[in-house]
Image (cartoon, rainbow, N blue to C red):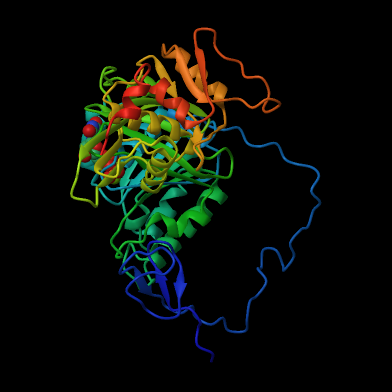
Amino acid sequence: MAKPAKHFMCSACGAAFPKWAGRCEACGEWNTLEEQMPLPALPGGMKPSAARAGKIDFVGLAGMSPPPPRVATTIEEFDRVLGGGLVPASVVLVGGDPGIGKSTLLLQAGTALGRAGRQVVYISGEESVDQIRLRAARLGLTEAPMALAAATQLGDILASLTQFPDAALVVIDSIQTMWIEGIDSAPGSVTQVRAAAFELIRAAKTQGFALMLVGHVTKEGNIAGPRVLEHMVDVVLHFEGDRGHQFRILRGIKNRFGATDEIGVFEMTGAGLAEVANPSALFLAERRGNVAGSAVFAGLEGSRPVLMEIQVLLSPNPGGSPRRSVIGWDSGRLSMLLAVLDARCGLKLAMNDVYLNVAGGLRITEPAADLAVAAALISAASDVPTDPSMVFFGEIGLSGELRQVAQAELRLKEAAKLGFSQAASPKRVAGGAARLSVPNTLKLVEIGHLTDLIGVATSGVKAAVQNKEVS
Ligand code: TYD
Ligand code: MG
């Protein structure tokens, strides 16, 4: 018999390798390769199923059954990320670091659905029934209808789920604690996690309930991470945030029924997760307008405009090899901006440590933040605060030119809504994009090249910056 080709699988990303190695070549994690049991050979090859007698039906592309109505959990931030509520018989994977609030979120979503008259089943493999009741009491949810159980053996769970033919939602917290008797590997291993997810997904599709799987993101190789399940499920959500901050962001990573890149913003309070309907106000709440080195970025998270504060601190480091410490942004992008500021504007920061922080614990991935970061850097270098009534957005190219970014109107509207009166943005090119409608309380300050920004970011101190020896 030929030897099965693939023997080791990475528990973090699911990549398969013929040989063991200390580090996964695909995702770079250490000690995550696990030996896989070869699948038993099928005696006599594959057989057609008895139910279908070896026949499947083929159809054309035309004709469509109407999509099933979505079920809103009534937690708006959650429904938005799902694309407008739960799709019956769909499978949602909610990943996140341990302790970030996944169980709390799903308990709140489940009870909200229960209160809306739907049947909800919550199965925990991590906590006892009493622990969950304690949390429910803390959240004031003890009266909400919900079927709760602590279990980990999948055979028992699947058999018991048939008691709930009308279930709208089944929560499994977490998939890494589930195990199937007869599979010869530990709970949490790639084999167990995949097999358990496969069986649960099958039950969701046949019984018609929406399934939510909690998956811990883990750096240790002994538990399979959610990535090994991403291709099996319909929706992948990440619950993220800094445990030192109260903000939590639910981010759509994959969604077969809606847009990805949507975010839901929550605040972890003493009484559970509170929805944050206006994140910009929250992220800017602690801003002090009169400090040099700060600029407000009019950003976009999914379809939603979010204003956030970029903070920069410079500290002299004449000894060479200066530090570049970045939280919430890409450090490669910061190096590029520093080089452009140096080459095109003569702003020399090579003898300074640069600390950059996105206040509130958000993570920015958009290049549109370039202009706000540049403004914060210029402000820090010149020790003059940026205009507190101004927001910034725009991408910066290597020659210092400003480039248009997506959804300028949305950004401007959000800035106007929060009381800002000026927006520094890339200069519109003649014959370029369609007319921009600018809210009438907002003045647009168009910037064509980075050198124009110096005057704008720290109005009136252009000369000071250019003459100052920042090194
Ligand atoms: P939890 O939902 O258990 O996290 P996960 O399931 O992702 O591991 O949440 C754990 C943290 O949330 C815990 O450190 C305490 C905090 N928390 C609050 O701050 N307020 C609350 O009302 C609750 C229920 C939890
Ligand atoms: Mg939990």
Closer to the camera, 258 or 138?
258
| 141 left or right, relative to 451 | left
| 293 left or right, relative to 170 | left
Q: Residue at x 46, y 68 (%)?
A: 15
Identify the image quadrant of the C terminus: top left
The answer, for residue 354, to whether it is visible in the render is: yes
Closer to the camera, 220 or 387?
387
Q: Is residue 451 above or below residue 232?
A: above
Q: Quadrant of ligand 2?
A: top left
Closer to the camera, 254 or 393?
393
Q: Residue at x 52, y 56 (%)?
A: 231
Q: Could you tell me residue 386's position as x and y percent?
A: 34, 21
Q: Quadrant of residue 138 in the image?
A: top left
Q: Residue at x 22, y 51 (%)?
A: 320
Closer to the camera, 88 or 372?
372
Q: Could you tell me residue 253's position as x and y percent?
A: 48, 45
